[in-house]
Image (cartoon, rainbow, N blue to C red):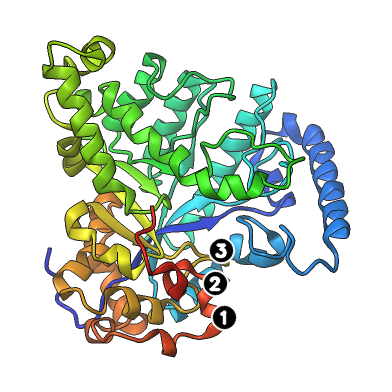
């Protein structure tokens, strides 16, 4: 796809949004309102206690920018005008919207790092997710050409999830659906279970992209151990990466070649080595007459007509938030057509408000044609953005192709910008998974 403009049309494949606690009430069915008031009061009380506990601490989970932290993100989560203003100033004119706040009836996690436990009250939890989706639809409607909203589903209710996928498609939530994780300590079957086939069928039939975001597939690391957050940080990406081979080896990509699968904010450097390992396992499982691989994996790969790396090239993508310069060097090996840049707005580890500098640092040495795919055309293809509708905005707010193609040195990066991994020179000495 050729873009006839001197400016990049910068699309972020990873930003976050969500209502504040009370903002979800109008989107709940009235029968849940009394229960919602009780839940909201409980959440507010817990938040006040947490704020009091962490008051005065220089580096606490409340003030180092954990995802969804209202002290950091504030009304950026839900203020449409502020989001547009700040992202325009930052050179971004369109985005894929992932959730960022607690939906109604979700129990408070020990920290914002943890996915809260599901508990037994599926009815209320599902009602809360549907409330978020309807709130999201209103947010998208305020700037529909700029926003592709990602709807949430619930693994505990396959039939309801199918209906929600159909609702999201009918209402043009072009971001597709967020596939939840099913870690070993969850009450749900793993993603390779045949019971989820109606979900994959519905997504394929409705042209809805499947998204899997880092942080949503982790088990409970415990909240009484000094190392729990450190272990979370080390392992969080892997827990989301594993969904890729779960769907590959359960035949989802074979049965549904039109499906698009996106792993977002899970890094990029892991892809080449992982695909090589998967290809090797596939080869031994499918063609070896001897050995444990064929015994244990033969049935799974019998109907796979492509190698894992070929499924990847055909229908899988990385939402590469704040892509590091060292990762940019791997893009050709991963597949230039399979990577989409993301800013991770409004998280403190994202590139905002230094995206101009970040783009020059990461993409300054790449050919313009490749940078255009990573910043624009890949996301437009996966999430159905109308580039004609975005061109005039890009010419007002996005950096020029010449600017992005002019490398910048770390000495020119503001010190406060180095909280973003892509702009911290300490992260550039080795490949990062």
* Res 147 visible: yes
Q: Secondary structure at mark 3?
A: loop
Q: CA distance from mark 3 to mark 1?
A: 14 Å
Q: Position of residue 80 (x, y in %)?
A: 55, 65
Q: Residues at badges 1 and 2 in contact (C-beta under 8 Å)?
A: yes
Q: Nearer the viewer, mark 2 or mark 3?
A: 2
Q: Residue at x 54, y 72 (%)?
A: 419
Q: Residue at x 22, y 61 (%)?
A: 377
Earlier in the chain: of badge 2 and badge 3, it is 3
Q: Which residue is mark 1?
A: 416
Q: Please give the count of numbered marks on the rendered protein.
A: 3
Q: Is residue 280 left or right of residue 70?
A: left
Instruction: Using the image, determine if residue 41 lies above or below residue 358.
Output: above
Q: Position of residue 46 (x, y in %)?
A: 84, 47
**Camera-nearest residue between 67 and 13:** 67
**Camera-nearest residue between 359 and 56:** 56
Q: CA distance from mark 2 to mark 3?
A: 10 Å
Q: Which residue is mark 2?
A: 419
Label 2: how many Cα within 10 Å (few below 14, some 14–19, many 20+): some
Q: Position of residue 223 (x, y in %)?
A: 74, 40
Q: CA distance from mark 1 to mark 2?
A: 6 Å
Q: Position of residue 365 (x, y in %)?
A: 22, 78
Q: Residue at x 38, y 42 (%)?
A: 176
Quarter residue 197 falls in: top left
- Mark number displayed over residue 35: none
Residue extending furthest toward the bottom: 412
Quarter residue 65 falls in: bottom right
Q: Secondary structure at mark 1?
A: helix
């Amino acid at each position: 796809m050729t873009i006839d403009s001197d400016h990049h049309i910068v699309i972020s494949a990873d930003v976050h949004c969500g209502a504040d606690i009370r903002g979800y009430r109008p989107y709940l069915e009235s029968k849940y309102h009394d229960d919602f008031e009780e839940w909201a009061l409980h959440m507010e009380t817990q938040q006040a206690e947490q704020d009091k506990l962490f008051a005065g601490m220089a580096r606490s989970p409340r003030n180092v920018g954990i995802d969804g932290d209202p002290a950091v993100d504030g009304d950026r989560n839900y203020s449409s005008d502020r989001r547009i203003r700040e992202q325009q100033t930052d050179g971004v004119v369109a985005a894929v919207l992932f959730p960022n706040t607690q939906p109604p009836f979700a129990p408070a996690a020990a920290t914002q790092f943890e996915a809260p436990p599901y508990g037994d009250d599926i009815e209320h939890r599902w009602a809360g997710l549907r409330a978020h989706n309807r709130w999201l639809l209103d947010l998208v409607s305020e700037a529909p050409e700029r926003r592709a909203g990602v709807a949430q589903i619930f693994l505990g209710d396959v039939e309801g999830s199918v209906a929600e996928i159909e609702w999201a498609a009918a209402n043009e939530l072009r971001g597709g659906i967020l596939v939840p994780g099913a870690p070993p300590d969850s009450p749900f079957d793993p993603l390779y279970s045949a019971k989820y086939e109606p979900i994959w069928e519905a997504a394929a039939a409705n042209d809805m992209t499947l998204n899997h975001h880092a942080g949503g597939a982790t088990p409970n690391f415990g909240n009484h151990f000094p190392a729990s957050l450190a272990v979370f940080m080390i392992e969080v990406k892997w827990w989301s990466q594993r969904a890729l081979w779960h769907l590959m080896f359960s035949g989802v990509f074979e049965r549904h070649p039109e499906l698009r699968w996106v792993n977002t904010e899970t890094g990029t450097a892991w892809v080449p080595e992982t695909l090589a390992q998967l290809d090797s396992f596939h080869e031994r499982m499918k063609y070896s007459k001897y050995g444990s691989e064929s015994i244990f994996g033969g049935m799974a790969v019998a109907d796979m007509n492509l190698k894992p790396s070929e499924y990847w090239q055909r229908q899988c993508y990385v939402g590469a938030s704040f892509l590091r310069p060292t990762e940019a060097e791997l893009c050709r090996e991963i597949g230039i057509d399979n990577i989409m840049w993301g800013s991770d707005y409004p998280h403190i580890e994202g590139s905002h408000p230094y995206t101009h500098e970040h783009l020059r640092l990461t993409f300054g040495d790449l050919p313009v044609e490749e940078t255009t795919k990573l910043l624009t055309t890949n996301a437009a293809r996966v999430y159905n953005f109308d580039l004609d509708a975005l061109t005039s905005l890009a010419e007002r707010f996005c950096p020029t192709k010449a600017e992005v193609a002019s490398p910048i040195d770390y000495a020119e990066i503001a010190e406060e910008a180095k909280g973003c991994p892509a702009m911290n020179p300490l992260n550039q000495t080795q490949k990062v998974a």
